[in-house]
Image: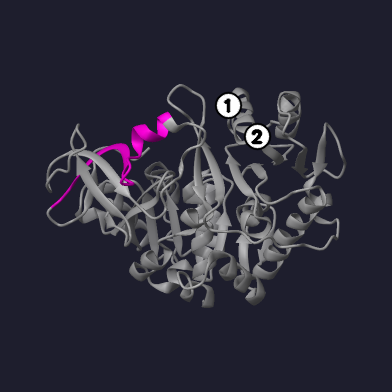
Amino acid sequence: MVVGRLVGRLGPQHLLSLARHLAGNREFLVTPHERLTQRQFFARVDALAAGLQLLGAHKGDRIAALLPPCAEGAYALFLPWVLGTVEVPLDPAMPEEALRHALADSGAKFVLTTRDWQGRDLAATVARLRPGLPGLRYVLARSSGRQEAAAYSIESVMASGTSLWRARASPKEEGRIAYLPGSAGAPMGIAHTRGAYWRLACPEVQAQLDPAALSCLVVAFPLHTYAGWLGMMAALVGGGKAILTGQSDAHRVLEQAEREGVTLLAGTPGLHEALLEAAGKRRLPTLRWAVVAGPCPPVLARAIGRRFGCRVASLYAREECGLIAFGPNPAERAASVGRAVPGVEVRIVDAHRMPLPPGRQGEVAVRSPQMMLGYYGNPEATAAVLDREGWFYTGDAGWIGEDGDLRLCRPAV
């Protein structure tokens, strides 16, 4: 695809404008409830952006997405490059107090959410919290045709029919604040510039995959996580389609993967184990790659290869610094997550943060062009893990073998 060939040559905003201009009728996004071509997808991103502008969205405003896997959650990923806004992705399973903290801490002006998710009315939850959130102006809920409980309908906002003024979005400006649970229970915001978050290693990963592997991806990770975002962007630059399963049921994931002709399926070791158990005699003949997040036990890698007849790879990433390592053939390399992707430096350090030689176990430290600015509004927590030379200390234990592969002693958090 033209877009994939130009990654790294054009700035992100120009690249996305080109993708929008070249968007055709090839399917790009499949959700549990709808199917969208590239042209339809980008038209809806623009419609949502225009509707938000009509409501007063300005450059730098925080737009929170409290959504399950759905089309609206995917649209929200692109708003920073259209409106110059800041994305605040939130886990819909967040406890109410953690949600209140994240919305207050980020200063969210808009919340995109839903009324019906696993028996919860998330829009009503946000409405209850709203009196204590003076910066929150609008709650927009999907699957509702009326204003209710202080929530607008996302569909009606998208149908407002207004013209869109595209902001000039600098890669150096803050573009994303993602919230993960903190050690004391309060979620910490992980802030990135737009440019840092965009610097994917997709071209390097594609070099290790045959191009056809990116034609149909199952995105089994939530869109509020880095891994979910990576899957969406891999589909974009690879010219393929992304399938948001929205399912925790392995049988349904397999049915959808078989029906859609999946070529790449990424997930946690637990998901792959569940898929193997549910597979029975199912083969998934179109599957070319199974990607396991974190170390893949050799016995699991061999079982995946035997059952589905595909290649297997491990991937190691962190929300703070993006994609770290990628490597094929984990069946031959116990605990390996592959080698550092191009542009990323990895070293193992001791308790004093001094580098250790290959083979010695210690803490994994990473320096990456996708590095966070820091934990939002928390310079003390930032200083504890990110030094002045740009090294991030992950807290994960591992070592680098003589073969150059990074090995983890326990799964990455």
Q: Secondary structure at mark 1?
A: helix
Q: CA distance from mark 1 to mark 2?
A: 18 Å
Neighbour class for label 2 at 10 Å: few (<14), some, many (≥20)?
A: few
* Among the 4 quarters of the image, the one containing residue 84: bottom right
Judging by the rendered image, the residue that carries numbered circle 1 is 98
Do we see residue 301 in this rendering? Answer: yes
Neighbour class for label 1 at 10 Å: few (<14), some, many (≥20)?
A: some
Residue 173: image location, x then y, percent: 55, 52
Is 47 left, or right, of 27 in this rendering? right
Do we see residue 220 in this rendering? Answer: no
- Residue at 32 percent of width and 62 percent of height: 342
Specify the segment rendered in magenta.
380-401
Indicate whether residue 396 is drawn in magenta.
Answer: yes
Q: Secondary structure at mark 2?
A: loop
Number of marks in picture: 2
Residue 36: image location, x then y, percent: 68, 63
Q: Quadrant of the C terminus?
A: top left
Judging by the rendered image, the residue that carries numbered circle 2 is 118
Closest to the observer: 294 or 351? 351
Q: Nearer the viewer, mark 1 or mark 2?
A: 1
Mark 2: which amino acid?
Gln
Image height of 177 relative to 157, above or below: above
Is 136 left, or right, of 221 in this rendering? right
Closest to the observer: 363 or 33? 363
| Disc on the earlier residue, 1 or 2 | 1
Image height of 298 relative to 181, above or below: below
Closest to the observer: 160 or 155? 160
Indicate whether residue 233 is drawn in magenta.
Answer: no
Q: Are marks 1 and 2 in contact (CB under 8 Å)?
A: no
